[in-house]
């Protein structure tokens, strides 16, 4: 099986891909039977799915600190995907950042390691640096360590692999991938969780498991109360909404579309009926997918 | 008047601050009477408002490509701000990225400038680099120019000022600030707009102008249909919603709060009545501010 994700090797996207393989029980379960392809952008991942270069693509869709990933929402709402792209799974990954460095004969002493002796520079993606501000100030800058930003947390890990005076703020996955030692774990200032979605072409159907979610995209007719009427279709059937977000439709300023996630599967009677009702009330309804809810 | 924004000098936040001063007609209208204070994070800007170190703070709240800025939404929903922080204005800034470099005697020839002769490295924030991917590939990488990421677009401009072989992808404002020549304008792959909000302490009131917006934060009681009932208060009074976004409340997994923007001002009769109705139906209602709508 082939999976497309954001590269390079060892980003949080890779952690999400490994997690999804485990939970969804897709493939043979053997790591060797899975081929991971790395892409530069979310759009590149989507194109690789449409070209059938990969069977699945796994991309971030929202983070509890940073909000929604616009590129992913826009990709899902595009009318130009051929064949269409569907959400077939979701994964929640707590973003735990570690300080990583190369273990050499010169720093094999455990105490020296923990005091970050020999580290002159710390590198990471600006988001990761921003999320570890306190740790950097108290434990690194105080010792005169220089701070530099690079393209990704994985690129940072790669730099640490090549220079023992450089430490990287990156994932545990990156430590494994680049054979680095974890000098400190969970160094981020505040907890955050990233939600990833697994994408595939629409010919792959996901069966109802009893604990599912359905993702919808809705274009309303432009008048007050339009959203209210749509939500009524869910409320009257006691269907719980887990997400609702307005996004500019890019057709005109002030023209909006809505991303709505609800509990239940397309095959459930209530969901089917609600969607029939919604369809009659909106300019456009697109089902983005129905898939097992992440734990 | 003192305004706090994200630094360093010359970021898009500074463009937003200048725009707001012009449109809101706050202050004397003279640039010299305005003092801009630069901060490292959105939380630092908020703290400077609460400490009365600045009169206003201007921060990004959403971008049409990247989605909402979680740090700003979380700051607004915090119960620990003392005194409380309110939204008193909004600004829409199209994100137009330029290629900037130092003009020296060696490259004063217009033709040489436009062909980017003498540029060995291009630097910018990873977001800006990602947004100019096509331009970088076709016009820079094709000529062997190296690409490097740095902390901010303004930091990139500063580097270009110090080294004539370095070009920066940054704002027009940064070109002025760091006395750089604009080698190419509007080099981003796709259009994007960032919405900024002006924040202040709650003792500053904004009067109704007839074209206003009101921003609300709502914690629902946890049951299906709760959001539907709240929206009914707006729909029945024909009040238009311009934004609705669910955010994890961080109290418990699956517990949500809602950011809602509606057209109209707190002082309007319909808005007043709608909010009275909403209050009776929710666990908590917080008015984040009422302010003139950006054009």
Image (cartoon, coloured by chain):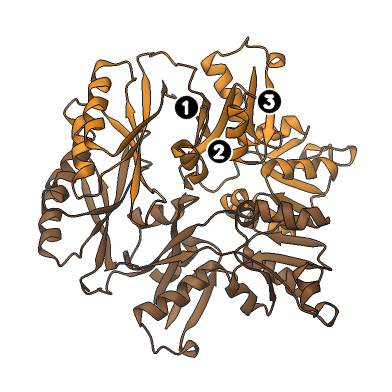
Chain colours: A brown, B orange
The answer to which image quadrant residue A135 occupies is bottom right
Image coordinates of residue B192 in percent, x first then y, are 50, 41
Q: Quadrant of the N terminus of chain B?
A: top right
Query: Of circles 2 and 1, which is in front?
Result: 1
Residue B43 seen: yes
Determine the residue positioned at 50% across, 42% down: B191
Residue B95 numbered mark, or none: 2
Considering the numbered disc 3 on the image, is that residue within a helix, a strand or a loop? strand
Considering the numbered disc 1 on the image, is that residue within a helix, a strand or a loop? strand
The answer to which image quadrant residue A146 occupies is bottom right
Q: Quadrant of the C terminus of chain B?
A: top left
Query: Of circles 2 and 3, which is in front?
Result: 3
Assess disc 3: are there few (<14), some (14-19) or many (≥20) residues with their C-alpha within 10 Å of its C-alpha. many
| Label 2, label 1: how far apart the Cα atoms are | 25 Å
Q: Considering depth in this image, is B276 or B35 the residue closer to the camera?
A: B276
The subunit carrying tag 1 is: B
Name the residue that disc number 1 marks: B86
Q: Is residue A58 left or right of residue A114?
A: left
Determine the residue positioned at 83% across, 55% down: A144
Question: Who comes first in sequence, dot 3 or dot 1?
Answer: 3
| Label 3, label 1: how far apart the Cα atoms are | 19 Å
Image coordinates of residue B122 in percent, x first then y, are 73, 51
Q: Considering depth in this image, is B117 or A173 the residue closer to the camera?
A: A173
Assess disc 1: are there few (<14), some (14-19) or many (≥20) residues with their C-alpha within 10 Å of its C-alpha. many
Determine the residue positioned at 31% across, 44% down: A257
Against A88, residue A236 (above or below) is above
Residue B36 numbered mark, or none: 3
Considering the numbered disc 2 on the image, is that residue within a helix, a strand or a loop? loop
């Amino acid at each position: 099986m082939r999976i497309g994700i954001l590269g390079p090797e060892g980003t949080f996207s890779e952690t999400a891909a490994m997690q999804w393989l485990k939970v969804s029980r897709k493939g043979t379960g053997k790591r060797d039977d899975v081929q991971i392809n790395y892409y530069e952008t979310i759009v590149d991942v989507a194109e690789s799915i449409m070209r059938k270069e990969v069977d699945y693509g796994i991309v971030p869709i929202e983070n509890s600190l940073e909000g929604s990933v616009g590129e992913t929402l826009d990709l899902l709402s595009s009318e130009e995907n051929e064949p269409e792209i569907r959400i077939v799974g979701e994964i929640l990954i707590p973003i735990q950042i570690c300080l990583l460095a190369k273990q050499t004969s010169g720093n094999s002493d455990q105490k020296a390691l923990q005091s970050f002796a020999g580290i002159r520079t710390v590198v990471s993606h600006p988001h990761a640096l921003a999320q570890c501000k306190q740790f950097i100030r108290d434990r690194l800058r105080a010792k005169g360590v220089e701070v530099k930003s690079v393209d990704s947390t994985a690129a940072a890990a790669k730099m640490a692999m090549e220079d023992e005076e450089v430490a990287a703020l990156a994932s545990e996955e990156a430590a494994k991938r680049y054979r680095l030692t974890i000098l400190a774990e969970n160094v981020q200032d505040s907890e955050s969780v990233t939600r990833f979605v697994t994408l595939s072409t629409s010919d792959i159907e996901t069966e109802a498991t009893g604990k599912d979610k359905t993702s919808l995209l809705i274009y309303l007719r432009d008048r007050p109360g339009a959203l209210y009427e749509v939500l009524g279709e869910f409320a009257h059937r006691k269907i719980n909404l887990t997400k609702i977000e307005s996004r500019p439709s890019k057709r005109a300023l002030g023209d909006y579309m809505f991303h709505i996630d609800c509990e239940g599967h397309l095959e459930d009677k209530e969901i089917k009926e609600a969607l029939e009702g919604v369809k009659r009330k909106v300019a456009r309804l697109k089902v983005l997918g129905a898939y097992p809810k992440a734990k």
